[in-house]
């Protein structure tokens, strides 16, 4: 109720301020243009990079220093820590990077955000950047009509820069005219009381605006015009860092556990960094003066000194916290752990991984492997076998002979309640993700969907096979028992072969060798099917089995080898990723 009343009142006050005060209207217009520009730049870089940014963030984060450096460079270039965070959460959710690497990127991204302060304090205040804004906007809009995604993306980047430059110009003009009627510098507060008050102001402004970059642009512009005191401006910059933790927390509420964990890491980092900056604000200000003289920054250029301070205390924060990343990660891993998840529910398909085609494909592949593993349990138990025996070093014949007890398993119930639901989630997620994918990605998606369909068809096949297997296992006809044991042996052979393939992938064996292993097993499967059918013909001729038995057995040979073929094809799709290598096995399609 309170929220419903206070929000319209604040909005009305905001409208009143815009209508009644020309100077405030100009400043607010500048902030709005700046935020529009940041949004255009974020979307533009997403299109313009063509996946390059995602590749960089995935490939160059193997160690903590590299993760920090990559986070810094990526954020400094794209001018959007939110874009970098979205990519990192997607990668983390898809399992492409670990939590330690993600935390390192977030730490580096905090340093990268300081690039905005340098942009505003140098280009924004030293030259009339508004004159460059209109050409950027014109060329940016023209490039929006291009059919090439990269050109459209670059056009959006130009539009973004144009709006940012216009926003800075408007804010600068607004503060200059405001000073004629109202000098905000008269409200400067000395000492630590002023520091804490202005930290609070900076944090509140960032929470309202939802952008620390925009807050810093306002602070630097106001400082350059002389509307705020230098030390108070430093406190406002610290407050902007604190305010980002609130915006990150708000954004993480609807996120998955990875987004929440990174928000906690961001909060811990910013609070430690802010604490260091507050405690040592005056020594840091003196250090900035010394560094400014070394870097040829004028003593009176308070805007650039503020940018230097902002970078300095973020770097100090990274140096102070990064040695403890392992301890921080162990703590984060204890947070937001849900209760044991229903196996019929998807484990990897979240809205976070849908942000990028690459992570969506990884998630769908992992979920298809999850479907494979859940279906495998049903298939193995329907054949009265146990996985621990199948994947042991025990001889296959011994496993089959010793596995005589019937396993009471309702395949129909498992299919309807678990496997079908999981398959449905994969199909739904794949349909929702494919709109942003190019042709190659859509082809890969089609392969995964087809594999998922083949996996559930295996469960249907084993459902038919289970009936006869259980019936004839009680038969006095030893020939029928032997033939069904051969079918079970064939299934174990294929499953062990596929397990070997999975181990090869984990051990980073070359994919050509993995595919060769699969193709050899396919050839053996063809030969075994022919041999079994020949055996059945011989048993019929020798009257060792009846025609009715032969009919059931022939059908079950078909079901068994259908399952084997689908298993091997699934292995090729799931564990051979290179398109060119996978095509070598296309002639073996069934």
Image: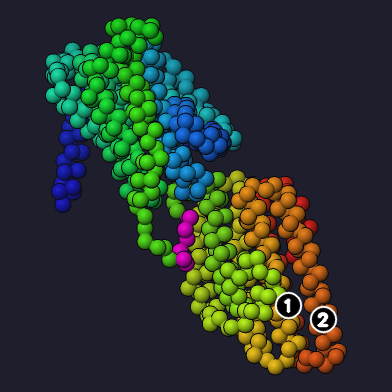
Q: Could you tell me which residue is drawn at 35 percent across and 46 percent down?
A: 331
Q: Identify the residue under disc 1.
A: 486
Q: How is the image coloured?
A: rainbow
Indicate the quadrant where residue 210 lies: top left
Q: Is residue 345 magenta?
A: yes
Q: Is residue 243 magenta?
A: no
Instruction: Read off the magenta span.
Output: 343-349
Label 1–label 2 contact, CB within 8 A: yes
In this rendered view, identify the residue nearer to me: 489 or 439: 489
Answer with left or right where residue 120 lies relative to residue 553: left
Quarter placement of the C terminus: bottom right
**In 3D space, how far apart are the residues under numbered discs 1 and 2 (Cα atoms)?**
11 Å
Give the mark nearer the N terminus: 1 vs 2: 1
Residue 255: x and y in percent read: 37, 49
Residue 312: x and y in percent read: 34, 21
Residue 120: image tag: none
In this rendered view, identify the residue nearer to me: 321 or 131: 321
**Is 226 rendered above or below residue 166?**
above
Dot 1 lies on which element? helix
Q: Is residue 9 in view?
A: yes
Residue 535: image tag: 2
**Is 501 rendered above or below residue 535?**
above
Q: Could you tell me which residue is drawn at 67 percent across and 79 percent down?
A: 401
Q: Could you tell me which residue is drawn at 32 percent across and 48 percent down?
A: 253
Residue 215: x and y in percent read: 29, 27
């Amino acid at each position: 109720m309170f929220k419903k009343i206070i929000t319209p009142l604040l909005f009305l006050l905001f409208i009143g301020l815009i209508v009644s005060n020309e100077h405030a209207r100009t400043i607010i217009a500048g902030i709005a243009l700046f935020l529009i520009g940041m949004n255009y730049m974020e979307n533009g870089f997403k299109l313009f990079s063509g996946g390059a940014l995602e590749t960089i963030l995935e490939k160059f984060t193997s160690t903590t220093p590299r993760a920090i450096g990559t986070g810094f460079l990526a954020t400094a270039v794209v001018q959007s820590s939110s874009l970098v965070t979205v990519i990192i959460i997607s990668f983390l959710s898809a399992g492409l990077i670990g939590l330690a690497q993600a935390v390192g990127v977030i730490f580096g991204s905090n340093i990268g955000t300081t690039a905005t302060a340098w942009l505003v304090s140098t280009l924004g205040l030293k030259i009339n950047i508004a004159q460059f804004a209109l050409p950027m906007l014109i060329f940016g809009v023209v490039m929006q009509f291009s059919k090439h995604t990269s050109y459209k993306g670059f056009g959006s980047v130009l539009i973004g820069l144009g709006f940012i430059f216009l926003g800075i110009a408007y804010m600068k003009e607004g503060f200059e005219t405001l000073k004629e009627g109202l000098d905000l510098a008269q409200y400067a507060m000395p000492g630590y009381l002023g520091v804490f008050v202005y930290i609070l102001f900076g944090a509140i402004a960032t929470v309202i605006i939802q952008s620390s970059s925009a807050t810093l642009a306002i602070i630097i512009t106001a400082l350059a015009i002389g509307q705020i005191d230098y030390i108070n401006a430093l406190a406002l910059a610290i407050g902007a860092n604190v305010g980002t933790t609130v915006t990150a927390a708000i954004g993480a509420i609807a996120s998955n556990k990875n987004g929440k964990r990174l928000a906690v890491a961001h909060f811990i980092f910013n609070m430690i960094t802010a604490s260091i900056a507050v405690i040592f604000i005056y020594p840091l200000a003196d250090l900035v003066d010394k560094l400014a003289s070394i870097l040829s920054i004028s003593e009176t250029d308070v805007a650039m000194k503020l940018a230097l301070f902002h970078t300095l205390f973020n770097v100090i924060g990274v140096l102070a916290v990064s040695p403890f990343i392992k301890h921080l990660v162990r703590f984060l891993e204890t947070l937001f752990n849900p209760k044991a998840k229903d196996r019929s529910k998807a484990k990897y398909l979240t809205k976070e991984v849908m942000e990028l085609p690459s992570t969506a494909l990884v998630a769908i592949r992992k979920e298809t492997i999850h479907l494979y593993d859940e279906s495998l349990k049903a298939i193995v138990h329907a054949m009265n076998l146990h996985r621990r025996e199948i994947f042991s070093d025990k001889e296959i014949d011994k496993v089959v002979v010793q596995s005589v007890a019937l396993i009471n398993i309702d395949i129909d119930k498992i299919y309807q309640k678990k496997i079908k639901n999981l398959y449905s989630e994969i199909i739904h997620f794949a349909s929702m993700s494919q709109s942003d994918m190019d042709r190659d990605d859509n082809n890969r998606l089609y392969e995964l969907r087809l594999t998922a369909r083949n996996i559930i068809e295996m469960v249907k096949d084993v459902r038919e096979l289970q009936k006869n297997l259980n019936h004839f296992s009680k038969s006095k006809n030893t020939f029928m028992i032997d033939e069904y044991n051969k079918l079970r042996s064939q299934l174990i052979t294929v499953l062990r072969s596929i397990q070997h393939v999975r181990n090869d992938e984990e051990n980073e064996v070359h994919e050509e060798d993995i595919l060769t292993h699969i193709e050899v097993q396919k050839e053996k499967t063809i030969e075994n099917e022919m041999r079994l059918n020949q055996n059945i013909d011989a048993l019929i001729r020798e009257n060792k089995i009846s025609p009715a038995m032969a009919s059931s057995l022939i059908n079950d040979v078909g079901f068994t080898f259908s399952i084997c073929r689908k298993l091997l094809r699934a292995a090729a799709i799931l564990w051979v990723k290179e398109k060119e290598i996978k095509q070598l096995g296309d002639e073996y399609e069934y």
